[in-house]
Amino acid sequence: MKKFLSEVFRKFAVSLVSTILFAVVFFFLMGGVIGSLLETPKPKIGLNSFLVVDLTMNLTERPGGLTFEDVAEQALTEEVKPLQLHLLEVLDAVKKAKKDPRIAGILIEGSFQPQDYGCGYATIREMIDGLDDFKSSGKPVIGFCHSPTQLDYLVYSACDELYIDPSGTLLLNGLASQDLFLGDTLKKYGVGVQVVRTGRYKGAVEPFTSTGYSPENREQIQRLLDVRWADYLGFVSNRRDISFRELKATLATNYLFEADQALDAGLVDGILSHDQMIDLVIERGALNEDGDWYKEVALIDYLDRPEPGESLEGADVHFSTPEIAVIYVEGVIVDGGVDDGSMVGGAEIVSRIRTAWNDENCKAIILRVNSPGGSVSGSDAILQEIRRARAEGLPVVVSMGSVAASGGYWIATDCDLLLAHEQTITGSIGVFGLLPNLQDLGARFGASFDAVKTHPSADLLGVSRPKTEQEMKVLQTHVESLYEKFTTLVAKGRNLPLADVKKHAEGRVWMGLDARRIGLVQELGGLTHAIDRAAALAGLGEDYEVIEMPEVSTPMDDFVEMLDSQAQARPTMPNSSFTALAETAGWHEAKQFLRVIEDSRRTYSWLSWYRGAFGFHP
């Protein structure tokens, strides 16, 4: 019997090793195939070509790219994810096209595909600034649309010439912010939620406790939407040479335009079918070698992106010359090492900041923030590392993107210079605690919790029971202490009286223009301006390179990293019983909320109702 079991175990071990070896060989072969598919040569750009900027993308702050997981998912599901491009690479490409004698102009087409925190209003405005700079060369920017969304039309309205398809429409019906409220739903399922918070305007807890916005929260969201819509109409009226009053009056009576109505209203310059549009671009540029199209180069092919594997191979030579590190914080801030564009871990950002200040050739750091906040502990970890970088002698500039609120503002309180766009959503200086419990839910299904404890409150942060009145007082004191810390950080960092900070705090959200007026932001400007200012603070002149963290990833990079035995496992977000409940109950929209509430102390500084394309809906 002993010999028999020994033989069974031996064969099992051999089979296991063979399977592992086969898997390794298979992955290497698959990697070679994918690599060969991806290593396509850059297209040759002919004289008088048009750079085609297809808006069918998710325009983000953080570099992304196509991952190995994306390739595998597309192969299995045949679903293609929207192309992800990030702001700086688009601006660099447009700037290059401005000086490129082969480029005759830019053609804009397509429609944005917002995901997570991409396609933010301020980000798109910065993209338009790049197009304006391109137009200063005398080269035209031509737009061709079918039925653009309002977000698309923001870009189209900035074109020198804008044409619409005869069957197209244009809808300009204003902005809206819609949120999912789970107050009654959670009660129905027996999920208890207790809250501690500071600030009248700190409405992040409302989706879990209410059936609608509080008056204070509704007031501030309405204010943001009104300011943004006024900015949008002002921008469109200026670019389309229509008086602001006339545009408002027109939209008050009609906001859905057929192609001929859009032309009559001055919202477009002409009506062209697709084949007519091709002929027009051929006239402005040149006919291709096949004689059936205009000479063109797609934006994705014009970008200065690394070839497959290049970013990993070049990792060891980072900061070999004077460089500025642009470190992206995009998504809800959580604990751990996650970074997927939706959530970003404090530990991950700390690691990147530390990598930068530890390299003697890195001369400045820019923290580009596009985050509605999140975990207090995650945010504070980032802040502490920023302080360390400054103590090591590196200037740190914080550049706010479309949103830098709550925890996203917390990490900006200690820096050498703080910049925001006029339409950045920022502030929301406040803290809250969210304490769910599943006691009633368990009881409904005959399940109960029991515990053995050394202290009555040893299970304080668990989900098995509601908290006592005394425990809630302790937690409220903790939250108020964090709020005092937050406001003190702001007062010290912005050199403001604490009383003034508290007057502008209470969880209140501000537009960048207003934040500059009340002192919460030092300067107005975008990412390129932040890079210029960081270079000046570091005394670099024009002799520097910009390094982005993270870099643009390729499937081969992911594949190699996955097989790298030296790769360190990074902590990810835990899947709590509360999150599992959302999945079981089918609350798909709630899942994103619930994945975030995993702070070790259940305390957050988070603008929960913000979405990437805030106010804009297809």
Image (cartoon, rainbow, N blue to C red):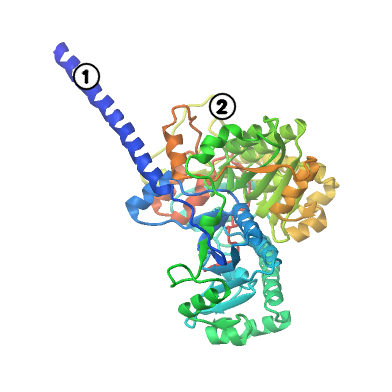
Query: Residue 488 at what x, y percent from top left?
Result: 78, 42
Q: Are marks 1 and 2 in contact (CB under 8 Å)?
A: no
Q: Looking at numbered disc 2 in the image, what kind of residue is underneath it? A: His
Among the two numbered marks 1 and 2 on one chain, the one whose residue lies closer to the N terminus = 1
Give the Cα separation between the discs numbered 1 and 2. Answer: 48 Å
**Label drawn at residue 455:** 2
Q: Is residue 364 left or right of residue 181?
A: right
Mark 1 Cα-neighbour bin, 10 Å: few <14, some 14–19, many ≥20: few
The 10 Å Cα crowd at callout 2, few under 14, some 14 to 19, many 20 or more, is: few
Say if residue 461 shows up in the picture: no
SS class, disc 1: helix
What numbered label is drawn on residue 589? none
Between residues 372 and 394, which one lies in front from this camera angle?
Answer: 394
Q: Is residue 460 left or right of residue 580?
A: right
Residue in the foreground of this view, choosing between 583 and 244: 244
Of 390 and 29, the residue lying toward us: 29
Say which quarter of the image contains residue 546: top right
Q: Residue furthest top?
A: 2
Q: Is residue 4 visible?
A: yes
Q: Quadrant of residue 210?
A: bottom right
Question: Amino acid type of disc 1?
Answer: Phe
Q: Which residue is mark 1?
A: 9
Q: Quadrant of the N terminus?
A: top left
Q: Residue drawn at (45%, 67%), measured in percent from left and top?
A: 289
